[in-house]
Amino acid sequence: MERFLKQFWWKIIGIGLLMFAIVSGLWIPLYQGVEGLSFPNLPILNESIRNLLFHVPMWFSMVFLLLLSFIYSIAYLGTPDRMKDNYAVGFAQVGVLFGALGIFTGMVWAKSTWGAFWTNDPKLNGAAIGMLIYFAYLILRSSVEDEMKRGKLAASYNIFAFNIYIAFIFVIPRLTDSLHPGNGGNPAFSSYDLDNTLRLFFYPASLGWIALSMWISSIWIRYNFLTQEYEEYED
Amino acid sequence: MKNMKIRNIFFTVLSLIFGQLLWAQEEPVTAELLNQSNKMIAVIAVLLIILLGITAFLIFMEMKISRLEDKMNKK
């Protein structure tokens, strides 16, 4: 993992994909009855459908980073190692950042389609509670002095936090009424408006956002590790 | 000086947030109008500049961290 995070090729590809997504996402017109490259022109969504290339990939990035954090927490409990703990907390911190960006882009989208920045939607409330669970994880970490104890406590908490978060944003919204596509009996995006043109830009955008989130995480993790090593060296 | 810097950052972030709040899709033809007046090019250019700025910052940080890692390994 360490070697992969230091490599440059995937970072360049990721930025390229993001540029492609930004330019195409804003440039390509909505379908106006004329043949050619166009995004679906749907009532309610209208021009806001372009946000699909920003909001959803940000959530994908968040879930991806939190999954990595979860895996490193399990690995840490197996064989405690400072680097694994660093990976777990670094991925979680950047994951929370992307979660906040996802919530923010979602709020803007909700205002234009549902008429309010925040609605009483189980997915929105679940995401907000999930964020609070991860804030608690970060506060819990900073409240324990002993490194070993902190690592084990945080890793155990993180395993539960990830599972609860997944239940909050993927399971519960499907069991009850929800405004989100694919939840509470609503048709999913892919079944009615994620057409092949949109797919052509949506998947590269998702990969681009994931690559950017990984790049930020790698720098953040390496920076934290260096700080720790330096502090120890100073002592 | 430090307070001034923090204040500047705070107000920049605040203005960015409220700038977003002002955006509303009253008419579904917003992008069409922007396209007709070529303002969409400006929007795309600004977004690309922001992305390139983030990329440049990440590359700068990457190089700096790599240098520090090498230094630390030598010690």
Image (cartoon, helix red, strand yellow):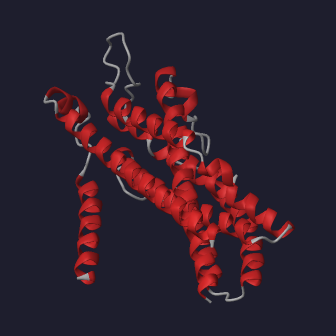
* Residue drawn at x 62%, y 51% as measured from the top left: A5
Whether residue A176 is visible here, answered yes or no, is no
Point out residue A32 in the picture as x, y percentages from the top left corner.
31, 18
Whether residue A3 is visible here, answered yes or no, is yes
Q: Quadrant of residue B26?
A: top left
Q: Is residue A85 depicted above or below A218 in this figure? A: below
Point out residue A23 in the picture as x, y percentages from the top left corner.
34, 32
Assign the C terminus of chain A to one quadrant of the image. bottom right
Q: Front-most of A15 and B21?
A: A15
- A119 displayed left or right of A83: left
* Residue drawn at x 37%, y 29% as measured from the top left: A24
- B60 displayed left or right of A84: left
As drawn, the residue found furthest toward the right would be A78
Point out residue A184 in the picture as x, y percentages from the top left corner.
61, 45
Point out residue B8 in the picture as x, y percentages from the top left corner.
23, 72
- A169 displayed left or right of A19: right
Q: Is residue A22 depicted above or below A194 in this figure? A: below
As drawn, the residue found furthest toward the front would be B74
As drawn, the residue found furthest toward the top would be A35
Q: Quadrant of residue A16?
A: top left
Q: Quadrant of residue A54?
A: top left
As drawn, the residue found furthest toward the left would be B37
Q: Front-most of A5 and A233?
A: A233
* Residue drawn at x 54%, y 50% as measured from the top left: A59
Label total for image: 0
